Amino acid sequence: MRVISATEAKQSLGMMIDNAQREPIIIQRQHRDVAVLLSIHDYEQLRGMQIEAFNIFCDDIARRVQARGLTEEKFKTLLKNDD
């Protein structure tokens, strides 16, 4: 992964966009990582992984609460009592 300074990023945005198609680029300010530039393909892949992980988490929680007897009706009652 390539690392560049924020100053260099400002001066060479076009080149950075081209390079980001091949690999993510870390942008540093005062020797600290502050941002990452990546291709839209890489971004969509990461986003898809997060959504998939969240859906797996939700499915797991649903199985656990069903196993403990929480029905949809009981859940709605709990939500109503929370007002």
Image (cartoon, rainbow, N blue to C red):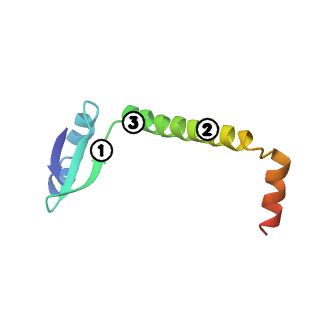
Q: Quadrant of residue 58?
A: top right
Q: CA distance from mark 2 to mark 3?
A: 30 Å
Instruction: Tell me if residue 24 comes above or below residue 83 in the rendering.
Output: above
Query: In percent of the image, x 39 and y 31: which residue is there?
Result: 41
Q: Are marks 2 and 3 in contact (CB under 8 Å)?
A: no
Q: Secondary structure at mark 2?
A: helix
Question: Could you say where residue 28 lies in the image, as x and y percent from the top left?
Answer: 19, 55
Q: Quadrant of residue 24?
A: top left
Instruction: Tell me if residue 41 comes above or below residue 29 in the rendering.
Output: above
Question: Could you say where residue 76 lies in the image, as x and y percent from the top left?
Answer: 82, 54
Dot 3 alpha-carbon crowd within 10 angstroms: few under 14, some 14 to 19, many 20 or more: few
**Residue 40's mark?**
3
Q: CA distance from mark 3 to mark 1?
A: 9 Å
Which quarter of the rendered picture does the C terminus lie within? bottom right
Query: In percent of the image, x 40 and y 38: which residue is there?
Result: 43
Q: Secondary structure at mark 1?
A: strand
Q: Secondary structure at mark 3?
A: helix
Question: Could you say where residue 34 lies in the image, as x and y percent from the top left?
Answer: 26, 57
Dot 1 alpha-carbon crowd within 10 angstroms: few under 14, some 14 to 19, many 20 or more: some
Residue carrying label 2: 60
Residue carrying label 1: 37
Instruction: Tell me if residue 82 comes above or below residue 27 in the rendering.
Output: below
The answer to whether residue 78 is left or right of residue 52 is right
